[in-house]
Image (cartoon, helix red, strand yellow):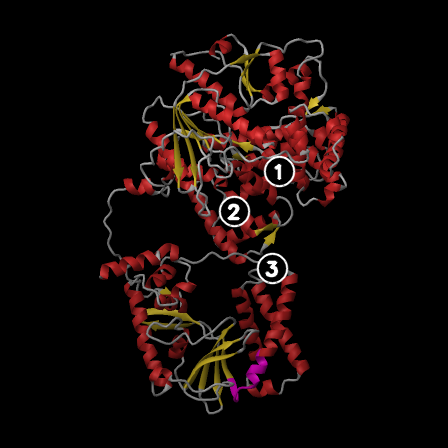
Amino acid sequence: MAAAAAAGRTILAPNAELSAALFDALERAHRDAGDEIWPTPRIFDLSSWLREQHLQQQLTGRNSARLLSDIEERELWRNVVEGAALGRDFLDPAGAARAARRARRTLSEYNIPLQALERERSDEAAAFLGWNRAFEARCLELNCISADTLLADALPADAQSPSGAVDWIENPLWRPAARRWLERHGRMLLPEDAGAGAVSVFKAHAAADELAAMADWARRESSDERFRAWICVPDLNRRRAEIIDAFDAALAPQRFALGASGAAGYAVAGGTPLADYAPVRVALELLQASVGSVPFAQFSMLLRAPQLQGSDAEAGSVARLDVALRRRASSEADLTTWLDLAERVARSEELGTSPGVQRLRSAQQQLSQLQGAHRFSEWGVVWIAALETAPWAFRARWSSTEYQAAERLRELLATLASGDAVFGTHGRESAQRILRRALRETQFQAQTGVPRIWVSGQILDPFLNYDGLWVGNCSDEQWPPPTAPVALLPVRLQRQYGVVAAGADAQLAHARELQNRWQKRANHCVFSYADSAEGGLSSPSPLLPKSAPLAAAPTAAPQPHWHAMFESAPELQSFWDELAAPYPAGELARGVATLRAQSRCAFRGFAEARLDAQPLERPIPGFNERERGEIVHHALEHIWSVLRDATALAALHPIEQGRLLNAAAVYALEIVRKRRDPGKKWREREQARLLNLLGKWLDVERARAAFSVESLETNDQVASFAGLNFRVRIDRVDRLADGARVLLDYKTGAASADWRGERPDNPQLPIYALLRPDALVAVAYAKVNAAESGFVAESERSRIFPRSHDTKLEGMASFADLVNVWSRRLERIAGEFAAGHAEVAPTNKACNSCHLQGLCRVPAALEEADESHE
C-alpha cells in the first residue's frame, strides 16, 4: 500500500471509516520513518472517489447531469413518497423514504434488475416501483443523477480505464457490482496476515461489565506506546454514550474534572448528529425563535446561551434579567415582543443595557430582511449574517471541535444553496424545517486522526494489522447477526442475488469468513459476550473457537465515571458549620416567610432569607397559582370595602351581587395584569372562574354569625421579635356583635391548622394575633377554593364560623394565654434566626415542600449527623 501511494496511485476502500484508517496508517509510517514532507496519499472510499470522477467529467464537458447531494436526494425521496397516494397514509413518510432509498441502492449494489422486481407480486414491491419511477422522472426533469448510478457512469463508453491508476483493498465489504467493476479497472491489494494470533473469550454478567472489560483491557495493553488496537462494538450507535463513559473512565478520567477536556488515547468511530454540537444547536435555536410564537423556556435558553455572552459579567447580568423576566413574562410571544419586554424589564430592574439582548436584536433584524418565499442561496446569506451577529460573534474562543462543527454547517448551507433547482423557493418556516432535518440527519465527528485505540461499530475486516483486536456481542443470539432483509424488496429475490443480510446461510458464511480474518489481523484476538439485561444467561456463539481460553477479568469492576477522581482526590477534613454570622441589627427581614422557613428548618431559613435561594418561576399559559391567589385577595378586598358587614351581605339582591362580583373581578384582574398580562383569552377565563368562586364564598360568609369588617388588607405593619423587624400585612379583621375580634387570612389552596406545636409549619396566624391581640377570640384561614370552601380556625368559642366548635387552644385556658405561648415560641424562633442558626434539621414534613435539597443535601447531612451522635 505504501508503494502504491508513493507511485501516485489511487487507493480505494469500501467505506469512509476504512479509508480514514488507511490514510492515517500511511501518514504514521512516514512520521515513524523520520520524513518531514511527503505527498498526500490519494486514499478514498469508493463513493467519494466516484463523486470526484463525476465532477472531473463535468469540468471536461463529458457529463452534463448534475449529481444530487445527499441532502437533495433525501428530500427528493421524501417529496416523492409524500406526494404519492399511498404516502398520505404513512405515519412516518420519512422512514418510508429512507427505506425506498436503501432499496434502490441495494438494486444497484447487487445488480438486481428492475424486471426481476416487476415480476414479483407484492404490495411493497409495487409501492417501491411506483416511487422509483417518480424519483427517476423527477431526476430526468432536473437533469440530475443519484449517487447509486455513479458506478455505471464512472467511465465514458469509449474508455478502458479510469483517470489515474487505481488500486483497491481486498475486503468482504465490497458489494458484487463494485467488486466486478474494480476487478476490471483496478489492481487488488491483499492484506498481510499477522499470523495465527492468540484467541481468548470473555463472558460478562452484564453489558456494562463487557464495556468495562474492553476499556480496562485497552488501558492495560496501551501501557506500551506502540500498542494499537481495533475494538468492534456492533451496537455502537445505540450505546455510544455508555461506551464513551466506560472508555473515559479507564483511559481519560481527566475528562470528568470540572472544566477539563483534553485528548484521549482512543476514539469512537461514526459521529453524532451535527445538530447536537453547541454552535449548531444555538444557531438552530436562533432561527427557530424567528418564526411565529416562541415559548418562554425557548427564549430563556436562547437569551442565556453562553455563545451570546461576551464575559462572565455579561452572563451574570443576563441571568438576573432572566430571573426578573420570569415574574413578568407571558408563556409565549414572538421574538420581537420578547426582546422589547427584556429591555423594559432591564430598565425597571436597573440592570442596564444587556449586550446579549442587543446582539439578538441585531440578528433578528438581519433575519427579517427576507420575507416571503426565496431560494436557499438567498436564505443562506441571511442566516450566516444573523449567526455571525449573535451566536457566532465570539467564535475566536471556540474549541477545535466547535470550529469544525460550524464550518460543517457552512458547508451544508453551501450544499443547499447549490440545489436551488431541486429545492425551488421556500418560505422562512419551510426552509428552516428542511435545514433542521438536514442537520439532524448529518452525522459529524471532529477530525482528530486515528488514535492507537479505535472503537468501531462496523462488523468488517479492518485490513490493517493490529497488536490487539476485541469483538463484542459474540453470544449465540448475536453472532452470526440475525437476518435483516432490506425493506420493500422481496426476501426471495434478495437471497437469489446474494444480499448477505437477507439469509441465515449467507450470514453464517460471512461471519465465519470475518472471524477467520480477525484471527489473522492481530497478535491477540478477544471475543466477548454478556448476559441479557433481563437476567437471562447467554452462551458463547458456536462459531467461537472451542479451545479458546477465558480472558482475564478486568482489574477493576465497572464504576461510575467519577470513581477515578474520587480515588485520586486528596484526603479532606470535614467539620460542621451550622452557625452563620448574626443577622444585622435593625435590618428589616423578609416578613412572615422568614420565620416560617426558620421554623420548618433552620438551614431553610438561612438559605431563603440570607442567601435569597428562591425557586425560579416558569411562566405558564394563563395566570399562575400565586397570581390567582392575588386576584382572589384583591377581589375580596373590593367586595368587603363595599359591603362592610353581614347585614349588607344578607340584603344583597342577586342582580346587585352579580354587578358587585363582576366589578371586583375586573378590579382584581386589572391590578395583576399590570405586572404580567397573559392575554385577553386568559383574562376572560379567569374572570368566569372568579365569578363562580366568589359567589360560592359569599354563600359561606352568609352562614356566619353577625359580624362587621373592621379592617381590610391593612398597610404593612412592622412586627418585632428577638430584636428583628418583620413587615406584615393582615388580610382582614372582623368585629363580632359583642365587640370580640376575629382575624382572617385568605387561602386559595389547601389549608390546615399548621400553626400548632413548638416548631409550627406556618406561624403566620400567631404573628398576626400578636399584632392585634385586643379582644381576639379566634384566628382562621378562610379557604376560598372551588373544591372545599370553609374555615380552618383556632377559637375559644363555638359557632363563630359555620359548622365550627371551640378548639383545645393547645391546652391553654383562654385565647389570651395561647397568644402568650405563641409569643414565647416566636421569640425563640426569631432569636435562632438572628443568632445565625442554620443547621439542617427539618421537621417531619418540611422537605415535602422544600426546593433546597440540592443545596442542603439533606439525606447525606442527616446520615452524617446520626453517625456523629452515635
| Magenta residues, start to end | 697-708
Mark 2: few, some, or many residues within 10 Å (few <14, many ≥20)? few
Residue under label 2, please give it: 301
Separation of marks 2 and 1 at Cα, in angstroms = 21 Å
Q: Nearer the viewer, mark 2 or mark 1?
A: 1
Q: Is residue 700 magenta?
A: yes
Comparing marks 3 and 2, which lies closer to the viewer? 2
Q: Secondary structure at mark 3?
A: loop
Choose top left, top right, bottom left or bottom right for residue 796.
bottom left
Near mark 1 (Cα within 10 A), the count class, few <14, some 14-19 or many ≥20, is some
Q: Earlier in the sequence, mark 3 or mark 1?
A: 1
Secondary structure under tag 1 reads helix
Above or below, 613 relative to 426: below
Q: CA distance from mark 3 to mark 2?
A: 20 Å
For this view, does 382 lie left or right of residue 116?
left
Q: Which residue is mark 3?
A: 678
**Residue at 54% of width from left, 26% of height from top?**
510
